[in-house]
Image (spheres, helix red, strand yellow):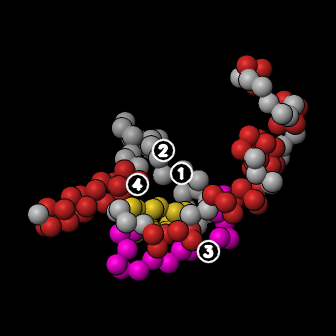
């Protein structure tokens, strides 16, 4: 697909990238006008805006996510409509996969859809209680 678009960098430069930060420095910064990956991270981060959340939100964050390793955990207060669940494992978007056990015929239900269903049920119960 590279050949179908116009970019300010060469295809060989992408192939030389060894880390996600290399790709972000080359592609994201070039495409969206950031100075570098750190400028990008600082301008798009939301952790300092969590206190402004006014609609119910549920965040699932894995501690082993390579994108956010070492970032620390955000704190929320009980009066915020925001819940953050931290897990030890899951990587980046690791909760969306279904896993089939070798001795099972059917796919094992992944953890994330069950957690989201619980969250939506809670929101619905709260909404009904308010009416």
Residue topped by disc 2: 97
Could you say where residue 14 lies in the image, as x and y percent from the top left?
82, 37
Find residue 31 and report its image quarter. top right
Q: Secondary structure at mark 1?
A: loop
Q: Secondary structure at mark 4?
A: helix
Residue 72 - label: 3
State which region is magenta.
66-82
Could you say where residue 54 lies in the image, as x and y percent from the top left?
37, 66
Crowding at dot 2, Cα within 10 Å, few <14 / some 14-19 / many 20+, comes out as some
Label pair 1/3, CB-CB below 8 angstroms: no
Label 1 – label 2 distance at C-alpha: 7 Å
Could you say where residue 82 lies in the image, as x and y percent from the top left?
39, 68
Crowding at dot 1, Cα within 10 Å, few <14 / some 14-19 / many 20+, comes out as some
For residue 3, say whether it is visible. Answer: yes
Q: Could you tell whether 36 is left or right of 87 in the image?
A: right
Residue in the foreground of this view, choosing between 10 and 64: 10
Q: Is residue 35 above or below residue 48?
A: above
Residue topped by disc 4: 111
Label 4 – label 2 distance at C-alpha: 9 Å
Residue placed at 53% from the left, 74% from the top? 74
Residue in the foreground of this view, choosing between 98 and 92: 92
């Amino acid at each position: 697909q590279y050949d179908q678009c116009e970019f300010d960098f060469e295809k060989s430069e992408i192939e030389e990238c060894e880390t996600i930060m290399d790709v972000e420095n080359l592609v994201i910064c070039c495409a969206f006008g950031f100075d570098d990956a750190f400028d990008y991270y600082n301008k798009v981060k939301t952790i300092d805006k969590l206190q402004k959340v006014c609609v119910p939100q549920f965040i699932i964050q894995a501690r082993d996510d390579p994108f956010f390793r070492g970032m620390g955990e955000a704190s929320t207060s009980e009066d915020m409509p925001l819940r953050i669940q931290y897990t030890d494992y899951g990587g980046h978007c690791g909760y969306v996969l279904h896993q089939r056990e070798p001795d099972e015929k059917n796919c094992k239900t992944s953890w994330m859809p069950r957690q989201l269903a619980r969250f939506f049920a809670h929101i619905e119960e709260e909404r009904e209680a308010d009416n």
